[in-house]
Amino acid sequence: MSRREQAQLRRQQLIDAALHQFAEKGYDGASIRDIAQAAGVTEALVYHYFRNKEHLFEEMLKARSFAPVLRRVLDEAGDETHPAQVLHRVLQEFLDMMYDNASMARMFIIEFMRNPICHKYFRAMLEDNTANLARYLQHQQQRGVFRTDMDAQAVAGMLLGLAFAVFFAWGHSPEREWQQRRDDFLRHGVPILLEGLWGQAADAKNV
């Protein structure tokens, strides 16, 4: 393993330890010392990779961000994939990512309203995801697929918000039950939501 690979592995180890500590103790309760001890390293090594706790927190969020996944899904879809399928996949990926990173998502819920530092970074992540999804919706409006009087930004926020609500309600469940709840939302809830978005063209649903 090269030095660079070793450094990347160590950095990821510190991010994983930070996630565990932040999820267990909250942002204010977790210290660099706690994170170093959890990772089995010295505090000095943590500071070698990260300027301070806030920098480590920010990098942890970036490492678990949905934004790269969302961009990949939308880029791969293009105009060839039906928008209903695209939105179904976006929401499924979003739900699965939250469930797979449940400790971070729970911290998100707890810390969002009470901690200014956490609020700043969480809000930036939400706005980034909402803006990316809104651009896709706007593109479909321009194609005549979705209604032109639709507020794409508001709809994007609503779709991601509803998915987050599904996780909030059922994300603590065992995997099999979670998958059933997720699939029920995607199979029944999403088509109902999309009914209000289609454009006036008779074949808008079938583009």
Image (cartoon, rainbow, N blue to C red):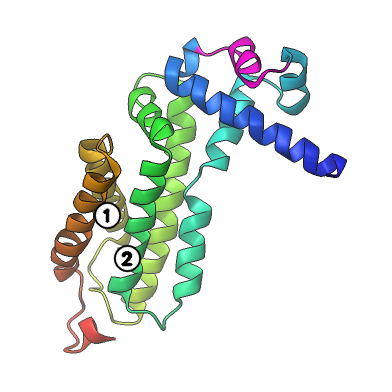
Residue 204 coordinates in the image, percent (x, y): 23, 84
Q: Residue at x 32, y 65 (%)?
A: 87
Say left or right for 30 vs 122: right
Does 21 sit above or below residue 202? above
Q: Residue at x 26, y 57 (%)?
A: 155
Assign the C terminus to one quadrant of the image: bottom left
Compare marks 1 and 2 and give the one earlier in the sequence.
2
- Residue identifier under label 2: 87
Badge 1: residue crowd in 10 Å (few <14, some 14–19, many ≥20):
some
Work out how far the residue at label 1 is from the one at label 2, CA to CA, in angstroms. 9 Å
**Label placed on residue 159:** 1
Nearer the observer, 120 or 186: 186
Quarter residue 106 falls in: top left
Residue 56 coordinates in the image, percent (x, y): 62, 27
Does 50 sit above or below residue 163? above
Decide whether the magenta segment is chiefly helix, strand or loop. helix
Amino acid residing under circle 2: Leu
Assign the N terminus to one quadrant of the image: top right
Amino acid residing under circle 1: Leu
Residue 144 coordinates in the image, percent (x, y): 29, 82
Does 107 sit above or below residue 194? above
Nearer the observer, 15 or 130: 15
Say left or right for 123 vs 153: right
Query: In this picture, which residue range is highlighted in magenta?
Result: 30-41
Q: Residue at x 59, y 23 (%)?
A: 54
Badge 2: residue crowd in 10 Å (few <14, some 14–19, many ≥20):
many
**Label placed on residue 101:** none
Q: Residue at x 57, y 24 (%)?
A: 18
Does 14 sit above or below residue 139? above
Tell me if label 1 and label 2 are in contact, CB under 8 Å.
yes
